[in-house]
Image (spheres, rainbow, N blue to C red):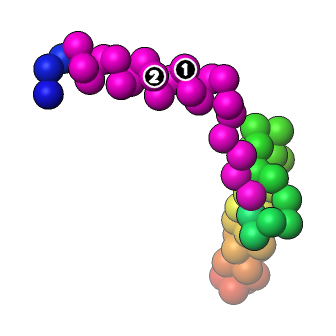
Amino acid sequence: MPYTTLLYKVQMLVSCLTLEKPIMRASDMFTVGVPLIPTLVSNIVTYVLVALQMDQNRRHKTHL
């Protein structure tokens, strides 16, 4: 495939995604969008921090 054809196809894809933003749905229960991403990341980070603290407390109690 020539470079110009590939470039044209990529430009068409980008313009289509810009004009009509894709919508992702999770089992038709809610829409997964950009505002949901920071919420998910913060929840995951919080969960990991709590789990690490609980593990550290457990290790500290077993060494006493």
Residue depicted at 55% across the width and 20% down the height = 15
Which structural element holds mark 1?
A: helix
- Residue found at the very far left of the displayed protein: 1
Q: Is residue 59 left or right of residue 4?
A: right
Disc 1 crowd rating (10 Å Cα; few below 14, some 14-19, many 20+) is few
Height in image: 48 above or below 56? above
> For the stretch drawn in magenta, what is the main secondary structure?
helix
Residue depicted at 14% across the width and 28% down the height = 1
Tell me which amino acid carries mark 1.
Ser
Q: Which residues are magenta?
A: 4-25
Please give the residue where the numbered disc 2 appears in the rendered image. 12
Please give the residue where the numbered disc 1 appears in the rendered image. 15
Height in image: 8 above or below 48? above
Q: Is residue 50 visible?
A: no
Residue depicted at 59% across the width and 29% down the height = 17
Q: Is residue 34 left or right of residue 63?
A: right
